[in-house]
Amino acid sequence: MSHTVLVCDDAIFMRTMITDILAQAGFEVVGEAETGTQAVEKYRQLKPDLVTMDIVMPDMGGIDAVREIVKQDPDAKILMCSAMGQQALVVEAIQAGAKDFVVKPFQPSRVLEAVQRVLG
Amino acid sequence: MDLSQYAELFLAESREHLSACNQLLLEWERNRASPEPVSGLFRAVHTIKGMAATMGYGRVADLAHRMENLLDHLRRSGRAPADEIIQLLFRATDALEKAVGLAVAGRERDADLSVLTDIDHAAIQTKPAPQPSALARHFAPEPVEEPSLPVASAAPAARIIDIVIRSEAPLKGGRAMLALRKLQTLGKVERVQPPVAVFESDDFDGRFVCELDTAAAPAAIEAAVRSVGDVERVTVAGGAAVGVDEPQASAAEGAAGGGRTRHIRVDLRRLDTLMDLIGELVTERGRLNDLAARWVGQDPEIDEVAIHISRLSADLQNEIIQARMTPVWQVFDRFPRLVRDVARQLDKQVAFRVEGKEIELDREILDALGDPLVHLLRNAVDHGIEPPAERKRHKKDPEGEIVLSAVRERSSVAISISDDGRGIDRVKILEKAKHEGIVGPHVESLSDDQLLRVLARPGFSTAEAVTSVSGRGVGIDVAMTRIRALGGSVEIRTEPGKGTAFVLRLPVTLAIVRALIAAVGQERYALPLTYVAETVEFGTVPLTTMEGRDAIVLRDRVVPLVDLRKLLGTNGGAPAPPPRRPVIVLEMGERRAGIVVDGMLSQQEIVVKGFDAPHGTLPVFSGATIMGDGVPALILDSAGLV
């Protein structure tokens, strides 16, 4: 059975692109979230194998969402989606419990490598 | 990976964020102390940066990045920004908007990035004093905070780990942090050099050393570190060798639950095509119904099928119309910025309010509505709202108010633009109208309706007649023509000293309307029912004349007549008109007219097709439709007849 993924990003553009990359590699994107609050809520509902998490989102940011999700599920597998120049935020996200990160602009091969690492 | 397929999505979403930027800047300009706008701006610009970088639009990404940098400084300083900063951000947003458009058009090189110098300059000026981040403070004292193990027992197992992250890896600090976390799963990590706070810096070179108190074997440690990816080299030195496998990641959780709503974006052209196809289906449905009526004697089942098909196509039509509905905010959201800019330019003070943002209209109508609204809003600021000094003299708030509102009515949407300005000077307009021979010399006053008709005369310059503030011609006629082409109507209400309101009434959807099919000579014409008040028979009501035109008296009101035969020049080969011709009474606001036709054939749904009228065509047609028998018919524009 293919792995299930929850894609969290406030930009539809980014969600579409990540979804396309993952779907082509045989993953099943089962949900999308536009805010940190939604991400936490959807994680609880969907219990996905993997979460891709944007750092900057309205309402609740990605790092706080990681903290909330990890609080509920210490084994949550969260892949941060960051941009150049977000070194400090990425370090903080990993501290909060994120398992890996990819850097925009995304290269499909790098995204899939990171996903494989996170899923072990 | 082919990125071109994402270009439209990029453009659409960037525009949404740019529109949000304008809203937030306006909010910030009004309320400098509020902390919310800057966070929202930061997020919007950041999102555009990420998308642009992904699309490979380097210049757009760079501009967004430098704006983000400035916004970050402003956000962290927590101080109210100076006016120049807000104005700079407005300029930067404009530059970003242009750059986005050019990039998608494949002309990113043409983008004007001259604003960058000012952005960078402002970023330097606003840079807050450096202070250790919360994380650095949290992480640095780590070995001290937790109760340390006795040094004696820790020393023999402590290994020194030296890790180098690949030089080409992005965000090496993040990668180093992952390696450190991995080591923490194996044992206690101490004496990280350089300290973790340095990982957060962009200057971090990707190399760090630490001590690990662990029972794991060197090979297992190395494998664990390498598993985080982008690791160039791992060296493990010292300690005892006791092999322990690295902990395995726990099994994944169960599959996802159901019950999720999904959205997809659809190209508008695809919806247009669907609408056209539905239109043809509706036409064929009409033919099927005609056939069924003829054949029902032979086989009653045909009637059943016809009814079923009718119902299905009606449902389908409804769904597609729904899919095309778009909330008006998608067009309205750019107006606060517009009103602000015009007001600033003219030194006026204007509070602008938008109401009914969530009201929905057909996408095509909404798109066509943009320009006329821009026109009317500009007018409201320019000619409606008085300069602050003049308002004070008249004991009015120096800040004027303009309200743009959308309200759903029965089968239409009313959009009004109202201002509390000086109102339109009827006396001056009347003088000018008399002077130009638009109204007779004996006319004493103009009703709202007549006023609008005078204003809407092409070339009638209200700028001269009403105000001396601006020399710019107005051209309400252009706005009115557009609204009428959409099957809408315009009303005006104005009161001297109190203000002016324009009310635009628009059909909710363009595509399919119920119409009355009338015959004139050998041709058929469709009249949308929206404005049909009633029908009467010529000869059964008293006749009179009104301003030299034939008219009928209907319940004590005089209704002027328009004879379509005469208007359309139906002649010669056409059969003689029947003795008793029907009159279709149209009503638009206060105005009425009776349209005299040869006969009324039916009432049916028609599919409106765009219509490029050849030059010289009478301005009384708003489109065309294909009838059930495949023959085209012209649609009469009620507004052009009344």
Image (spheres, coloured by chain):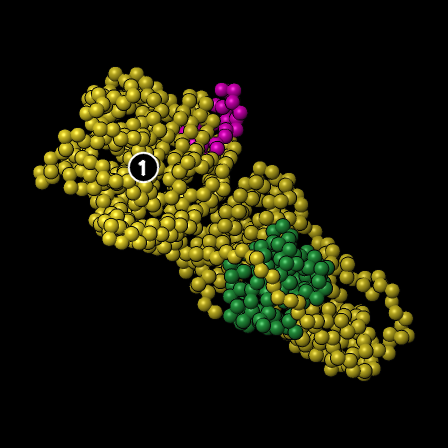
Chain colours: A green, B yellow
Q: Write down the residue under mark 1.
A: B529
| Camera-side residue of B357 and B604 | B604
Q: Residue visible at 40% across and 50% down?
A: B315
Q: Position of residue B317 (x, y in %)?
A: 38, 50
Q: Is residue B310 left or right of residue A120?
A: left
Q: Position of residue B408 (x, y in %)?
A: 45, 37
Residue A60 in view (yes/no) = yes
Queried whether the magenta region covers residue B395, the answer comes back as: yes
> Residue B66: which quarter of the image?
bottom right
Residue B175, compared with residue B522, is above or below; it is: below
For label 1, the crowd category at 10 Å Cα-Cα, with few meaning under 14, some 14 to 19 and many 20 or more, is some
Q: Residue visible at 29% across and 19% down?
A: B556
Q: Residue visible at 66% across and 67% down?
A: B253
Which span is picked out in magenta? B378-404
Quarter of the rendering occupied by the C terminus of chain B: top left
| Camera-side residue of B4 and A33 | A33
